[in-house]
Image (spheres, rainbow, N blue to C red):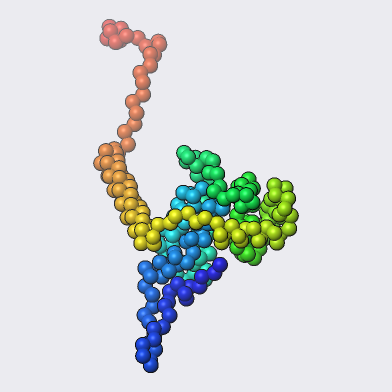
Amino acid sequence: MYFSAHLVRSAPPAVSGASATPAAPAGPVEAFDRLYAHVAPPLARQAYLLTGRRQLAREAVERAFHQAWERWPEVAVDRDPAGWVRAATHDYALSPWHRLRPGLTRAAQPPDQGDDRRLRTALLALPAPYRRTLLLFDGLRLGLPDTAAETEASTPAAGHRLMHAREALAELLPELASAEQVRERLAALLTGGPTPPLAPPAAVRSGSERRVRGWVRGTAAMTALIAAATAFTLATAPTHYEPAIAPGEAVAGVPPPWAARRS
């Protein structure tokens, strides 16, 4: 699922009468909205397949696009902007920190019926790295090197994950004994499955900008706090070394002062 940087950054030429004049390059807002409209719905279905949670799937997609908007100059010239956002979506969706969040400890019951529900349940029973590798290679038809790179694994490790994932899936669903059957069923889920509701692109952009403003304010407040603490330390710190006073000790064998005067 590649989305070229040229498509993201430019618009088709406009034709007026007998002469064609090239349209002005799309601005960042238009390019971002175009990318969001193109890839956000399938990414939401992928995140839902990985997690089994609609709210987490929507959150993963929106958080990934928040990051994309914050780094838009970098994302816009990437050879595969859709892949950039996909990797961010999958990373967030499968983050182990979600286990600590109340209400996200268990996946909701899939809304599908029959074989689709059984397949979703079986996928969620797989370890997260196996699940993601299976989705990328068999569901999205990425090559093994690309799958390994996106999952931050070596190519042999990705191959082993894929093999073990298929074996585990076949044990849970004997009718999916062949790789082609797995690919067909995953493709059907990814294209015809339910799509979690998504916010409009304008709301995602504004949410990203609010996050950046909050981060800037937080950084400024922390910097001011550190500067104030440093100034207080410099103002109250001693300017010279003051040796500690040794505690008094009793000394034996010394005559009293009055004895010395009599002698």
Residue sitting at x 47%, y 76%: 6
Image location (x, y in percent) of residue 128 = 60, 49
> Would you place residue 21 above or below residue 40 in this image?
below
**Quick one: 221 or 232, which is closer to the camera?**
221
Image location (x, y in percent) of residue 53 = 51, 48
Disc tally is 0
Residue sitting at x 49%, y 69%: 78
**Which residue in the rendered view is the most extreme toward the bottom?**
18
> Would you place residue 164 above or below residue 205 in this image?
above
Quarter of the figure that contains the N terminus: bottom right
Image location (x, y in percent) of residue 81 = 49, 67
Image location (x, y in percent) of residue 203 = 36, 58
Q: Decide if residue 248 is on the left or right side of residue 49.
A: left
Residue sitting at x 53%, y 52%: 48
Kindly tell me whether residue 19 is visible in this rendering: yes
**Quick one: 148 or 37, which is closer to the camera?**
37
**Quick one: 112 or 256, which is closer to the camera?**
112
Q: Decide if residue 247 is on the left or right side of residue 125.
A: left
> Would you place residue 95 above or below residue 41 in this image?
above
Residue 245 falls in which quadrant of the image?
top left
Residue sitting at x 48%, y 60%: 41
**Which residue in the rendered view is the most extreme toward the left?**
235
Quarter of the figure that contains the C terminus: top left
Kindly tell me whether residue 74 is visible in this rendering: no
